[in-house]
Amino acid sequence: MLLLVGLGNPGARYKNHRHNVGFMAVDRIMERWSFAAPRSRFRSEASEGDLGGVRILALKPQTHMNNSGEAVGEAMRFYKLSPADVVVIHDELDLAPTKVRVKLGGGVAGHNGLRSLAAHIGPDFWRVRVGIGHPGHKDRVSGHVLGNFAKQDADWLEPMLDAFADAAPLLVKFDDAGFMNKIALALKPPRKKEQAGEPDKPAPPKD
């Protein structure tokens, strides 16, 4: 079993915050792969499912972001898992929108959810960083992170969440390169190559 954890804050007022993109990604995965209806476990909304033959417990901690590690630690101890069996999806200021990066271990970079996780389960868990962009100045960071996605953000956010969910089986098999590549291709498909043997069309004559 793997724990697939989305980070966010519970409640309607936070639902569309950039800080809640981890919740959004987990919701889209559960919907796409027909996970069981969520129920309250480990101080989280928890749902079981299968991704490419891998048994998954998806968690959305309801402890608020700053105490996410308490909920994840409870689930990890119950199933006797190691930190490397935990995959955490979270927002990342230092990545542009639509960019997704995966790594094992690392620092917390000022992210309170990651800080809580590191304190309760150690730093050696998988991090899936979902870019939300930087507002440009440190004084605007809090309002940006704890603000709603703008209406026009749906143009990239919805396709990104769909691509994320479609690629999720690669993520839980630890094919991080394949996972990131599949998302990138879905969001920016390569140009169609000229059909084999078809000559290039000449440019139209100039007047």
Image (cartoon, helix red, strand yellow):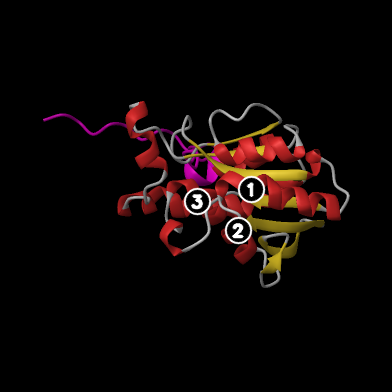
Q: Quadrant of residue 205?
A: top left
Residue type, label 3: Asn
Q: Secondary structure at mark 1?
A: helix
What residue is rendered at 31% in x and 54% in y? 151
In the visual, does 172 lie left or right of 202?
A: right
What residue is rendered at 42% in x and 42% in y? 145
Residue 15 lies, with reference to residue 92, above or below; the image says below
Residue under numbered circle 3: 20
Q: Can residue 168 be found in the magenta stretch?
A: no
Q: Is residue 128 visible?
A: no
Q: Is residue 92 visible?
A: yes
Foreground residue, 61 or 102? 61
Percent across and percent down for residue 166 are 62, 54
Foreground residue, 74 or 136? 74
Q: In the rendered view of the protein, which quadrant contains the C terminus?
A: top left
In the visual, does 69 lie left or right of 50?
A: left
Percent across and percent down for residue 39 are 68, 70
What residue is rendered at 68% in x and 68% in y? 40
The mark nearer the N terminus, 2 or 1, is 2
Residue under numbered circle 2: 62
Residue 140 lies, with reference to residue 57, above or below; the image says above
The reply to whether discs 3 and 1 touch (Cβ–Cβ < 8 Å) is no
In the displayed orientation, state which residue is furthest to the left. 207
The reply to whether discs 2 and 3 touch (Cβ–Cβ < 8 Å) is no
**Mark 1 Cα shell of 10 Å, populated few (<14), some (14-19), many (≥20):** many
Foreground residue, 152 or 143? 143
Residue under numbered circle 1: 68
Q: Secondary structure at mark 3?
A: helix
Q: How far is mark 2 from mark 3, CA to CA?
A: 12 Å
Q: How far is mark 2 from mark 1, CA to CA?
A: 8 Å
Give the extent of the magenta segment: 184-207
